[in-house]
Amino acid sequence: MQIYQELKTNEGVLRGYLHKPNILENVPLVVMYHGFKGSKVSNNFLFTQFSRYLCKHNIASLRFDFLGSGESDHDFSYMTFSKELNEAEEILNYAKTFPFVSKIILMGLSMGGVIATQIAKENNFDIDKLILWSPAGNINKIVELRRNDFTPLENGNFDLGGIELSPSFVEDIINHDFFNGIDNFTKPVAIFHGQNDQYVPIKVSQYYKQIYHNCQLYLYENADHTFYNVETRNILFRDNVKFILEEK
C-alpha cells in the first residue's frame, strides 16, 4: 500500500510516500534519503522499485523529497548539505511515531548515504541498521575541485544544467568532515557499490568499511553509480532484504 505523505517543517513542506505492507504491527521500516539532484523516485525509478520490492517482503519504507528537490517546497538553490541534514533528522523523528514499526533501518544513496552516516552517528539507539548505496564521501572534494568550472549567473548562483545551485551549498559542503565520529554508530552496516561507478571510487566505500566496526561491503560487476541494469537491481534488492531481515 502506497500512501502519500506531507511533513511540515519550519522551513517548508516535505512531500513523499510511505509504503506499508498489509501487516498490523512489528514491521521493519526503511527510511530512504536520496542523493544530490535526486528525488524520492530516484534515477530510473530506483527508489520506487525498491520500495515496492520491500513491501512485497513485508518491509515498510518512507521516502521524501528534500526541500528544493522533487515535489517538496522551494527551488533547488535553497538546498545545502546542512539543511538536508536537518530535514533528514525531522524525517527520522517522524518515522519514530509510526506505531506499527518494529525497527528502523536508515538507507541513503550517494550524498544521501553521507547524510545517513551523519544521522546514524547521533541516533545509535533509534536506528537498528544502516544501509549505504554508493556513499559519496568524496562529494566535498569533487565540489571543491570543480567550483571554478560552474557557470555563474547574474544573481550569484550557478547554472547546473537548468537548475540553480547556490554558493551557500558550495561553501557549506566543503567545510564538512564526513568521517569524523561516524563510528559512534556501532550497529550493523551494509555498503553496496557498483564497480563501474562513474562518480564515487570504490576506495571511498572501502574506507567506510574500515571505519565501521560491523560492516559488510557488496560490490557489483557491470553496475554504475545508480545500478543501471535490471539484473543488478534484482540482486541488489535481494541482498538488501537479506541484510534487513537477518538477525544481528
Image: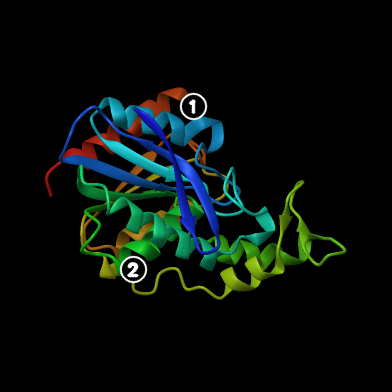
Instruction: Look at 37% across and 43% down and name the residue there.
Output: 62
Up-down: is 8 above or below 24? below
Q: Please, what is the three-letter code of the amino acid marked with disc 2?
A: Ile
Up-down: is 104 above or below 241? below
Taking the image as drawn, is residue 150 in sight? Answer: no
- Count of numbered labels shown in the rendering: 2
Left or right of residue 57: residue 169: right
Residue 188: quarter of image? bottom left
Q: Where residue 133 appears, x then y in whole percent? A: 41, 46
Instruction: Look at 59% across and 72% down and name the residue there.
Output: 172
Asked if disc 1 and disc 2 are in contact, CB closer than 8 Å, the reply is no
Q: Where residue 221 appears, x then y in whole percent? A: 43, 34
As measured in the structure, the alpha-carbon distance from the residue carrying label 1 to the one carrying label 2 is 31 Å
Q: SS of the residue at dot 2?
A: helix
Q: Where residue 35 appears, x then y in whole percent? A: 52, 50
Left or right of residue 140: residue 56: left
Mark drawn on residue 205: none
Up-down: is 157 above or below 131? below
Instruction: Look at 72% across and 65% down and name the residue there.
Output: 147
Q: SS of the residue at dot 1?
A: loop
Residue at mark 1: 229
* Mark before the other along the chain sequence, 1 or 2: 2
Q: Please, what is the three-letter code of the amino acid marked with disc 1?
A: Asn
- Front residue of this view, candidates 23 and 212: 23
- Front residue of this view, candidates 223 and 38: 38
Left or right of residue 124: residue 181: right
Residue at mark 2: 182
